[in-house]
Amino acid sequence: MDITIIHGQAHKGSTYHITDMIRESISSDNTVIHEYFMIEDTPGFCVGCYKCIQSGEQYCPHADKVQEIVSSIIESQVIIIDSPTYCFEMTGQLKTLFDHYGYMWMSHRPRKEMFSKIGIAVSTAAGTGAKNVVKSIERQMFWWGIPKVYKLNFNVNAMNWDGVTEKIKTKISNRVNQISEDIKNNINNVKPNIKTKFLFNLMRKMHTGNDWNMTDRNYWDNNKWLGSERPWNLYNRL
Ligand SMILES: Cc1cc2nc3c(=O)[nH]c(=O)nc-3n(C[C@H](O)[C@H](O)[C@H](O)COP(=O)(O)O)c2cc1C
């Protein structure tokens, strides 16, 4: 199994440690980890050139960094994305990465491999706001087509991991252990729910009459999604 981990921060604080606990409890001996840290792996800011959406993702001025992470995501069964809560939101550097993935939202050119993956969104806050952050991360992964996203948000009442009390660490550890069992049972076993299927079909209708973006339209056509093929059926045939 492969796991891609995208840290919305460079430092190893509470958020990193919780993600690491999850990694450890869902990994086995042959698990391959692809790990990225924002800022080091953050592409430059999106400049709004629309090249990814209109011409192809390879034409993004930041394609090198952006596509390296996409390749890891495609190879992985589980994608973990974390961020500390900054002013009720994810970090700016993580949002910068997400902006580059607009082209692979269901409304444009989602990757068929996404429709069988598990996502995990992690955030910590000192007091409040982490719930908002995991919801935002979940929303991004949902629009990539990922059918199941687990959310782990904790108020740690601290500025860093050393400052977190043993009581809170035990609560976190119990929650991680509980959710990890569920995650392990669901690996290679998830299917899109009605919400994903509904939105995919709405996008399908939109692309059927799409004469404003032939890159998107041809993509849907080549995947036979404008006909009867669906991305989630791929894995039923294997
Ligand atoms: C710039 C900045 C903004 C923050 N905003 C919030 C916030 O909106 N709500 C909150 O409860 N804590 C906030 N915090 C505290 C952190 O979210 C909290 O300490 C978190 O656990 C840090 O995670 P880390 O140890 O992984 O860096 C903020 C911290 C910083 C540095």
Image (spheres, grey):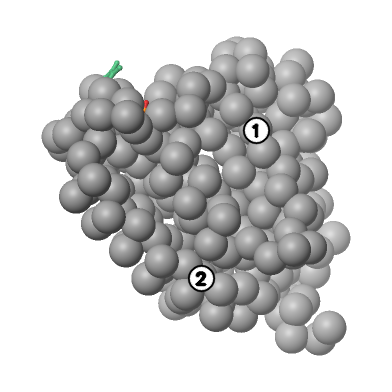
Q: In the displayed structure, would residue 178 be above or below residue 32?
A: below
Q: Residue at x 34, y 32 (%)?
A: 161
The x, y position of residue 189, in whole percent, is: 61, 80
In the displayed structure, does residue 37 sit left or right of residue 86?
A: right
Q: Is residue 29 above or below residue 54?
A: below
- Taking 64 as reference, is 4 left or right? left
**Quadrant the C terminus occupies:** bottom right
**Residue 208: quadrant of the picture:** bottom right
x then y, percent, for residue 178: 37, 71
Q: Residue furthest front?
A: 166
Residue at left offset 60%, top offset 27%: 37
| Numbered label attached to residue 36 | 1
Answer few, some or many: residues within 10 Å of disc 1's Cα (few below 14, many 20 plus, some between 14 and 19). some
Total number of numbered discs in the rendering? 2
- Percent coordinates x, y for residue 7 in the rendering: 53, 34
Q: Is residue 199 above or below residue 15?
A: below
Which element carries disc 2, helix, strand or loop? helix
Q: Quadrant of ligand 1?
A: top left
Marks 1/2: CA–CA distance: 21 Å
Q: Dot 1: what SS?
A: strand
Residue most extreme to the bottom: 237
Mark 2 vs ligand 1: CB below 8 Å? no
Which of the labelled discs sits on residue 183, or is there none? 2
Query: Can residue 226 be spotted in the picture?
Result: no
Q: Residue at x 45, y 40 (%)?
A: 17
- Drawn side of residue 205 relative to residue 195, left or right: right
Residue type at numbered disc 1: Tyr
Please name the amino acid that badge 2 sits on: Ile
Identify the mark at residue 229; answer none if there is no mark. Answer: none
Decide: few, some or many residues near mark 2? Use Cα within 10 Å; few <14, some 14-19, many ≥20. Answer: many
The quarter of the image holding the N terminus is bottom right
